[in-house]
Image (cartoon, grey):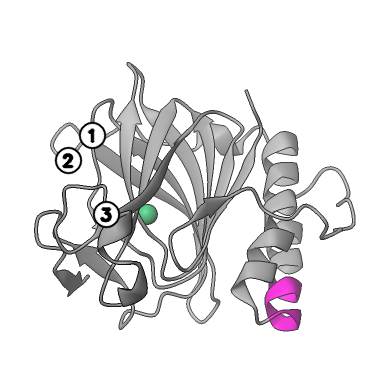
């Protein structure tokens, strides 16, 4: 377990975040409703998504460290799709969704962004994240950075995450995940309010973007 925090910027650069945001240590037991209340306060106080996820990350770490029931809430991957989602929290008119996501070994996701800030904490298994940039959004960094197979996208990096690692995403960060190893990847996923006009899936070969 490395228990490493990562952050993926709007330009899909994966970095180690600045650790200097101090958050008061929450009380134990850290009930889900307290976690949600703390999150709501952060979202009301800070409008910058980079600051938000930096403050939210230690709270998620605290929640996962002190609420062992959460890691039992996963579903086995659907044998037809290779993945499954168990929604732990999703309330109308409240801009947060919590899901347990499971990927079968060897499964690869689409290339996508989320159109909102997001956080993924790995509970079990090993997940490779590959990061991509859309050149029409960032034309100045086009061909010289191109490494990937997608003609319209270029790869900005990759990172293998294991149990205890937490990665946060800005709304425009583009990634693709692959479940490595022999066991399913089980993760805790937290997202803000999706802007469906800004959430895309990208074709790997052409880089064409489609809303989803
Ligand atoms: Fe994703």
Disc 1/disc 2 C-alpha distance (Å)? 9 Å
* Foreground: disc 1 or disc 3: 3
Q: Residue at x 59, y 43 (%)?
A: 166
Residue 67 percent coordinates (x, y): 70, 38
Q: Which residue is mark 3?
A: 146
Q: Residue at x 43, y 60 (%)?
A: 12
Q: Which residue is mark 2?
A: 81
Mark 1 or mark 3, earlier in chain: 1
Is residue 106 highlighted in magenta? no
Pointer 1 and pointer 3: residues touching (CB < 8 Å)?
no
Q: Residue at x 40, y 33 (%)?
A: 127
* Foreground: disc 3 or disc 2: 3
Q: Give the side of residue 159 with respect to residue 25, left or right.
A: left
Q: Which residue is mark 1?
A: 107
Residue 57 percent coordinates (x, y): 68, 53
* Foreground: disc 1 or disc 2: 1
Mark 2, Cα crowd under 10 Å, few <14 / some 14-19 / many 20+, is few
Determine the image quadrant of residue 199.
bottom left
Q: Give the side of residue 88 with respect to residue 34, left or right.
A: left
In which quadrant will I find the N terminus?
Answer: top right
Tell me the element at label 1: loop
Mark 3, Cα crowd under 10 Å, few <14 / some 14-19 / many 20+, is some
């Amino acid at each position: 377990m490395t228990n490493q925090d990562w952050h993926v910027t709007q330009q899909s650069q994966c970095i180690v975040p600045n650790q200097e945001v101090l958050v008061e240590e929450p009380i134990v037991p850290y009930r889900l409703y307290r976690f949600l209340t703390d999150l709501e306060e952060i979202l009301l106080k800070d409008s910058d998504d980079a600051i938000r996820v930096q403050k939210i990350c230690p709270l998620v770490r605290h929640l996962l460290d002190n609420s062992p029931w959460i890691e039992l809430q996963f579903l086995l991957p659907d044998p037809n799709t290779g993945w499954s989602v168990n929604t732990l929290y999703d309330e109308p008119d409240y801009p947060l969704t919590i899901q347990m996501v499971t990927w079968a070994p060897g499964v690869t996701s689409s290339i996508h962004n989320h159109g909102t800030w997001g956080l993924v904490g790995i509970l079990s298994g090993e997940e490779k994240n590959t990061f991509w940039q859309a050149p029409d959004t960032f034309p100045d960094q086009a061909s010289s950075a191109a490494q990937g197979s997608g003609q319209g996208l270029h790869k900005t990096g990759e990172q293998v995450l294991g149990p205890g690692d937490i990665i946060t995403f800005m709304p425009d960060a583009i990634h693709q995940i692959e479940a490595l190893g022999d066991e399913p990847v089980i993760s805790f996923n937290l997202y803000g309010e999706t802007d469906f006009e800004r959430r895309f899936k990208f074709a790997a070969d052409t880089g064409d973007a489609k809303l989803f």
